[in-house]
Image (cartoon, rainbow, N blue to C red):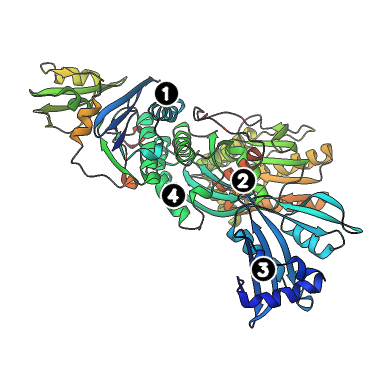
Amino acid sequence: MISEFQLKDIKDIINLGLELNPQFKELFNIDKLSEYENIIVYKEKNKLIGFLHYLNNIDYIEIINLIVLKEKRNNNIASFLINYLLNNFNKKIILEVRESNKPAINLYKKFNFNSINIRKNYYGNESGIVMERKKDIYILGVESSCDETSISIVKNGNTDIATTVLTQIDTHVNYGGVVPEIASRMHTENFTLVLEDLFNKTSLKLDDIDAIAVTYAPGLLGSLLVGLEFAKTLSFVYKKPLIKVHHIAGHIYSNNLNEPMEFPLLALIVSGGHTELVLMEDDYKFNVLGSTLDDAIGEVYDKVAKVLDLPYPGGPSIEKCALEGKDIYKLPIVMNNDELNFSFSGLKSAIINLVHNEKQKGNIINKNNIAISFQKAAIDQLVRKTRLAIEKTDSKRLIIAGGVSANKFLRAEMEKLSEEKNIKLSIPKMKYCTDNATMIAAAAFPLFLKKEFSEFNINAESSKRLY
Amino acid sequence: MYTLFISTYNYLITIGLLKNNKKISIKEVKSVKNHSIFLIPTIESILKENKLEINDINEIIVINGPGSFTGVRLGVIVAKTLAYTLKINIKTIPSIDALAISNNILKRKIVSIYDNKGAYFAIYEHNHRISNIKYLFKNDFDNKYINEIIINDNVLDIEKIASFLKDINSLNPHNLKPVYIKEIEVLK
C-alpha cells in the first residue's frame, strides 16, 4: 500500500536509509524538510518496506531517495513508488544514482529515464549518474477525412490513452458509397459529442493536452474542413499548438502503437487511394520505390465488389465471400517483372470479362469463387512486389499501413513473407487499420518534437500527397 | 456581457463583438471558398484589437444558414465548439431572418439570398416571418414573385440581431445544426 508518510514513520525511514548509507541520519533531517519535499511510503501489514523522497519543483521533480528493504527487492515495490509519481505529476523527473547500482539504473531505464550527465567521483571514488525522464507528451488527434468522426489522446506517440470513433457507415451503405455532403453534415453534428465521449473515458482534461493534431489532407474536402475548424477552435481556446497531419502519415505511424518503429524500414502502403512501397530512412523521410500505375488496391476491391453486386465497402465484402469460395479461375499474373510498381486495372478487366462471359453463357456466377481468385491474384501482386523490394533494398524491417492492412489474407501472407525473408514485420492492430484519430495523434508526435506547428490560417487539401 | 457574433453563410465572413448588446467592433473579410483560412484568425484579431481573451466572451450568436453549405458548417462548428468548451450561451438565427431584422421590414417584403442557381427566401411583414424559408431556382423564383418587393441586401445589423435574440433561450451546443433548406442531390 502506498501512502504519504506520517511522523510515526520517520524512525523506520531512517533505519531503512541507514541500510544504504551510514550517514543517512545526518543527511536526513525531518525538521529541515521544505514545503516542496514529500515522502511516500510503501507498507505491507503496517510495516514500512520502502519509501520515495522527492522534491516537487515548479517544472520538474527530483527524486532524492528511493529505498526498498533488502529482502523485499525485486518485488516491483520501487516500480509502484515511481508509478505513483508518474500518475500524480506530469513533469520531468531527474535523479542521481551510483554508477555501480546497476539494478536501479536498469529499473530507471525501464521507466524511460536516460542518463544525461556523469558527476565524476561524486561518491568519493565512485561517480554518480544523473538521469532524466522527460515529461509525458499528450497529443489530442482529430480525424474526419472520410466517414469516421474520431478524436483520440495518445501519450508519447505510442500509447493510446483514450479514443472515440463514430462511424457513419450505416448511413452511407444505403447509397452504395460515401456521400460527401452527408459525411460533412454528420461530422458537424457529432464532433462535440465525440469530444464529450472521449473525455468520459479518461481523467485527463483538455488543459493537460500538449498539442492538438488534425488531419488536413487528403480526403473529402468538406469533411476535412469540419475537423480542421474544430481542431483550430480547440487549439485557440486552450492555447495549445496546432499540428497538421497527413492522413497517410497517420496510417504509417499507427505502427508506433505496436512498438516504436526503427529506421530504415520498408513500408507497404495499401488503401483506397494508395498502393506504394516506400523506404523510410527516418521519421517523415519517404523515398517512394514504387506505386500503382492505375487503380489503388482498395479502389479495385470496391470496383470488383460492385461488379459482383456485393455491398460497399468492397474489402470486407470480398474477403467474406472468398472464405467460402474455391480458387478455380485462372487470372492473369499482372506486373510479372522486375519493377516495383503495381497495376490492378488488368485484373479488374479480367474479372469484368469473366462475369460477362459467364452471364452470356447463361451460367450462374459463383461470387465466392470469383472473390477468392481475385483476392489471391491481387494480394499475390502485393506480396511479389514487396518481396522484390526487400531484396533490392536489403531491408530488415517491414511495416504495412493503410485501410487494406485490415485484410486478414494480406496479413497472413505478409507474416509468411516476413518468415521467408527473416525480417521484422509490423502490421497495425485491426482497430487502427480503419480511419481513426489515434494514428493522427501518433503521427503528430515526431512533428511535436521538431516543433512543426501550424498557424490558424492553414487550409484543408483534398488531394495533397505525403511524398 | 460580451457577445461574439459569427456569420459565414456567404462569401463574407462577418465577426462582430458586442458589449451588453451594443456593437463595439465588426470585421468583414471577403473569402471565396477559403473560410477556413480566415475564420479563426479574424476572431483572434478582433479580440486582440479590443484587448479581450476568448475566455472573456459570455455568449455566441451564430448564423446557422441557409447559404453556402461549407461556409455555414464552418461557422457552426466553430460556434458550437466555442460554446461547448467555454461553457457559455449560444444562440442561432437563420441568415434570412438576420437580414430581415437588419432591414426593419414593416410592409410585406421578400428577403432573398441568391446562390449561383437560385434563391433562398422568405416573406416578412411587421418584422415577422410569415412563410417558411424556401429555395427556388432562379427562373421559378423570378416568375413567381415578379410583383413583390424583393430585398437582396447582405448588410447585417448585429445590434438589431442581438436585441431580437435577447429573450430567446440558449441552445445546448451539441444540438446545434446548420439549416440547409436545399436537398442533397443524391437524395432527391
Question: Mark 4–mark 2 contact, CB under 8 Å?
Answer: no
* Mark 3 or mark 4, earlier in chain: 3
Q: Please give left or right for residue B148 compared with residue A465 in the image.
A: left
Mark 1 vs mark 3: give the one in front: 3
In three-dimensional space, the C-alpha distance between marks 3 and 2, rounded to whole angstroms, equals: 44 Å
Percent coordinates x, y for residue A327 in the rendering: 65, 51
Q: Identify the amino acid type marked 1.
A: Lys
**Res A125 label:** none
What secondary structure is found at the residue carrying circle 2?
helix
| Residue located beneath label 4 in the image | A194
What secondary structure is found at the residue carrying circle 3?
helix
* Mark 4 or mark 2, earlier in chain: 4
In three-dimensional space, the C-alpha distance between marks 4 and 2, rounded to whole angstroms, equals: 19 Å
Percent coordinates x, y for residue A160 in the rendering: 59, 53
| Host chain of mark 1 | B
| Residue located beneath label 2 in the image | A442
